[in-house]
Amino acid sequence: MKKIHIAFLICIVQLQILNTVDAQSIFSDTLYNDYKAAYNLNDAGKYLEAYRAMSDVRNRMLNEMRGKTAKMLSENDFLNYWWPINRSIAETAYRLGLYNVMLQVADEMDSAMSSFQFPKNDCYAQLIKLDAGRHFLTGDLVITEKELRKAMELASPYETSFISDLHDEFAQLYYRKGLYQQALDHLDSVLPNPELASQQALCLAQLGQYDKALSMLESQKAKTARKRAELLRQKAKILMLKYDATGEYSPKSRQYYTDYLQLSRAYIESHFIDMNESEREQYWMTEQPFVTDCYRLEDKAPDLLYDVALFSKAVLLQMGRKFKPGMSSVDKKKVLSKINVTWQQVQRRLPDTAAAIEFIVYERGHADHLGALVLKKKGKPVFVPITPLNDLLNHVLPNGKTIEELLPCTDDINAINTIYYDTSFHKLIWNDSLRNAIRGCHTIYFTPDGILHRIAIEYMLPEYKFFRLTSTRMLTETTHKIRTDNMLMVGGIDYKNARPDRESKQDGVTNDDLAYQLLAPLNIHLKELKGTLAEIEAVDSLRKDKTNTLLVADSATESSLRNLIEKYHIVLLSTHGWVDRAAIVDSDLRPATTDAQLSQSCLFLAGAEQNLSDSTFDAEKPDGILSARELAAMNLSEVDLAVLSACVSGLGFATPDGIYGLQRGLKTAGVKAVIVSLWNVSDTATSLLIKNLYANIEKGLSIHEAFYQARQQLRSERWSYRKYGRTKYSSFDRPFFTDAFILIDGLE
């Protein structure tokens, strides 16, 4: 897919524009039919497929305009082709959270209208609605409401479908703001559709009309197992809202959630192997509310909640799963069998003096809370309340700043040190109740949730041996000693140039054009990282008798990496990392319908900067941007350890079912263990840490021991610098240096 840019508008200017409706169309019937097919994909909720199909139609429209410059773009062509195609791609980008694409396309649409004389109120209303959606995605709800009001004022009363869409957008906005009566009022104005009754019921429940809400859902007919499951979830949600408000608990809510989990497991077992990527995403994003809803059961059903935590994280890691060609259905189902792991199976694999913790974030009383499900060798799981999430975020540090203010400061050494030196903050997470729950244990296996994905909580209690896991389900899987016979190292990358590749891409692998579309407008400049070359060369020198492959300078291309990475047991990638800060917004009324966030976490390889600045670059070709989505599509089951020696490589979007980022991409691809960073790291400290890590591995230490010893070794290192003409020395014994990297799934 070509980069979206102003070329469409230039083509319009090149043509003489007639404001008539009877001029001969310059567009083919095939183009229109393909546009309708793409539109139907969007209407069916297959947004990822729709976006790519719509983008292809848009590029072909451009080519047809270029190829027929002697003809004229009539008002009819503008209104029936150019405008709806651009509007549709912007609306699909909204569903995917691609707010930069929305802004670009909307700007082009706005500029193009100036060439015509017809009444434009409806067109402006559509543009303003798109702008409102963009602000909704980025969390600016005040501007969102203003824009929606403008759009409603401009819209023609005869455009009933468009006005209905505006009411739906108002409903989502007000529900998110907690203004449930306003949300319900707007839903009452939406054109009838199958989902309307359930949305109205949820609003009624939020307003305290629980019996009426349940009655409304009881009247719904479930024609499919999926619809029956969704009705079960919504009924349970309403009962839990009643429990929040009145203290009246109904055991039916547990039963509803239990039945829902059984239906979900059965559905995945029957359908998941035959789903494509888009269908899996659409399925799971509609499941997300179930995860956070049922956690509200707290101590009423900790065993059920532990199973839900295992289930949700197992499914998450299979979202981008690519099965090997020729793989039988039986073998595919074996791969997915881990989805049905239970807490009893985890317990059987726990050592006697160990505990497993699944941290959870859930909603109670319109506020998010942090809790923990703790499992020991004997007994059932127990639920431990920790703290309201706002108490954690608003915790005031010694410098007068809050955690919420300092946590995003990923390049501020003082901010990071202030957070990790504050013992009172540690006690908010590892509170007395949680410490009592793990009493008698020496080893802790834990899975974080929410904000804990961004905090190295395993370094707060040095008296315990911690293992950070993508899911405590990992304890049930067979492990083996890390293989050190071969290693792939990437560093010293030339971001402005790339050596021509003999193979543009692997068979069956396409470039992540969504990542390119997000990054291209940002005018990114990637500085040379000279220390990364020294880093991989130092590691190379430690492994003289092993098979090592180094990709450096302009040879560190995306195609070269893709062609090699699946063959190695250890991988070291030293480069720049990038994470977009905006996330898709979802709610009970309209859950997010895709995980496009995987395109919003990337590593940069050779030629990336040059390709991003090239307005004619074909984003279907390897672009030097390696996204989490592309990693997830690879088969990296032979990789025992992947180290991302890059800034913020461990960050992403924290959701109820995990972190959407590079670590998830690697784990989905089958990598056994991953080391990533939580902030912008020091080049010198990182090089020392990585060198010591691999030296320890060469000594025969386990991944876990090699990593933790490397951190201890870093504490004793000193570095020199010049100040006022004199050489001074400083230590790395500060959290900013020693706690920057985390090890995930370091089990052997």
Image (spheres, helix red, strand yellow):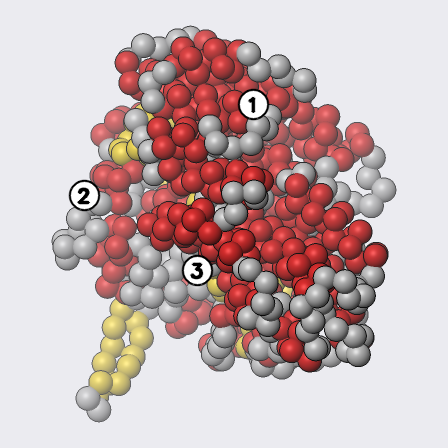
Which residue is at 37% across, 69% downward?
682
Q: Position of residue 561 (x, y in %)?
A: 67, 66
Check contact, mark 2 vs mark 1: CB within 8 A.
Answer: no
Q: Position of residue 320 (x, y in %)?
A: 65, 45
Q: Secondary structure at mark 1?
A: helix
- Viewer-side residue, 408 vs 618: 618
- Viewer-side residue, 527 vs 582: 582
Mark 2–mark 1 distance (CA, rounded to whole Å): 42 Å
Q: Is 746 above or below relative to 447? A: below
- Viewer-side residue, 94 vs 260: 94
Q: Which residue is mark 2?
A: 424
Q: Position of residue 625 (x, y in %)?
A: 60, 66
Q: Is residue 122 left or right of residue 446?
A: right
Mark 2: which amino acid?
A: Ser
Q: Quadrant of residue 613?
A: bottom right
Q: Secondary structure at mark 2?
A: helix
Mark 1–mark 3 distance (CA, rounded to whole Å): 37 Å
Q: Which residue is mark 1?
A: 230
Neighbours of disc 1 within 10 Å: few (<14), some (14-19), many (20+): many
| Quadrant including the C terminus | top right
Which of disc 3 and disc 1 is earlier in sequence?
1
Q: Secondary structure at mark 3?
A: loop
Q: Position of residue 469 (x, y in %)?
A: 48, 40
Which of disc 3 and disc 2 is earlier in sequence?
2
| Quadrant including the N terminus | bottom right
Of labels 1 and 3, the one closer to you: 1
